[in-house]
Image: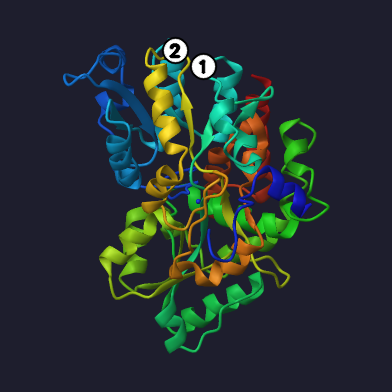
Amino acid sequence: MKRKLLSILLCTALTAALLSGCGNSSEPADSTSGETADAAEETGGDDDAGAVTEAASEGKTKVRMTYWNSEDTIQALLDYLAEEVPDVEIEFQFIDNSNYDTIVDTQLSAGEGPDIICESPASSLKHAKLGYLTELNDLGSKYSSAGTSVYSYDGNIYALPGISWFEGIYFNKTMFEENNIELPTTFDEYLAVCKQFQDLGIKPLAAGLKSWEPMLKNSMAFVAAEYLSTDAGASFGEDYRNGEAKLDGTWNVYLEKWSEMISSGVYTTDMTGIDHDQSLEEFATGNAAMYCSGPWDLDAIQSKNPDLVVDMMPFYGTQPSAGWLIGGPGCGFAINAASENQEAAMKVLAAISTEEGQRAFWENNQGGSSYLEGVEFELPEAYDSASSALAAGNVYCPWNEWGEAAGAHETYGTEMQSYLLGEQDLSQTLTNVDNAVQELLEK
């Protein structure tokens, strides 16, 4: 089973010396944060499309690139591209993750949209099937199949995998050491650690449950460790996207165990009023012992408290193991088939598909790995305690296997919020997700 997961979804290039939204607003990433774009920028109508096709005043070709991550998560890459491809001017457009798919889908269906699109595996599959994307087989051949497989359709590659994303549990290393608290190796030990901090009057875990992502990732990491990484769960993702399996009746037993996160008071209902930035602040200022996130948040944590010594542990199942991280291929760089700037866009993707381009992208996402053959990065010290999980290749994104129904992972997150609030039982929670998945598969 592990070999199958690694060959399809995981970062096979990971080693102990190297290591992510969906990307999403924590991720991955999936993963990210940033200010919501202005309404005009988000909708990006005909004026935007027209501007993209015009040459800049200095003889440059202007291409528009959209991404659900804020510009600071890609700034080093943009700087590199400005030097490496001087005849191309990139107009970066941040679109908040909550509106990203809707806005891009609308533009592409109208024969418009950005020249370069940052795609999730699910959206690239959808857009490739609809003929919206340019085939990228030549550049794609430079990347490992572990990265390109989730961006392929009908034998062709339609997006180039960016730096991988991953998420684990940041912890205040000094706080653990000063209180003689040992790192856990199982889920039960993790809950015991949380209880130790609670007894000391210290909040064990900062969590911004106003977003649907923390409930999604934390619970799915447990299911990955307990079920999806085993022989019994080997085919679940494939069966699920083919409509041959359901969450309800399959995941219940695992999520009932994971629900001890709620019954033990680690996750509380008042956290649904706390957002990502507030929870990050809480951890960074020493008011909580742990915080679930990934490399995209490390700079923000350290800038708020340069003296904070952080490390990352993985998520655990009930049996002792190296642990698991939620993650996989990050954004895939695709080219709009309707773009009038194909040559310029291809130059940009070719520049990204170099060791220098990968390192520039990695600079603002340190901790991720590259799928470009022959490129490796050194793992920062902040991920020392996750190194065994990374070396084992235990980085997995369950919803990447859902195919065209992958967009329902947000439904899963919001339904788990309702479950936390006591608005429905676990069976109804999973049934609601199953229904949303079925609707997407039937479209």
Q: Amino acid at mark 1?
A: Tyr
Quote the CA–CA distance across marks 1 and 2.
Answer: 7 Å
Q: How is the image coloured?
A: rainbow
Element assignment for label 1: loop
Q: Position of residue 23 (x, y in %)?
A: 47, 43
Can residue 275 be seen from the camera position used here?
A: no
Element assignment for label 2: loop
Height in image: 193 above or below 222? below
Instruction: Name the residue carrying label 1.
Output: 132
Callout 1: few (<14), some (14-19), or many (20+) C-alpha neighbours within 10 Å?
many
Can residue 65 be seen from the camera position used here?
A: yes
Instruction: Name the residue carrying label 2.
Output: 338
Question: Which residue is nearer to you in this view: 137 or 197?
Answer: 137
Q: Amino acid at mark 2?
A: Ala
Query: Of the residues under marks 1 and 2, which one precedes in the sequence?
Result: 1
Callout 2: few (<14), some (14-19), or many (20+) C-alpha neighbours within 10 Å?
some
- 304 left or right, relative to 430: left
* Residue under the point 52% across and 34% down: 160
- 129 left or right, relative to 303: right
Q: Position of residue 398 (x, y in %)?
A: 64, 46
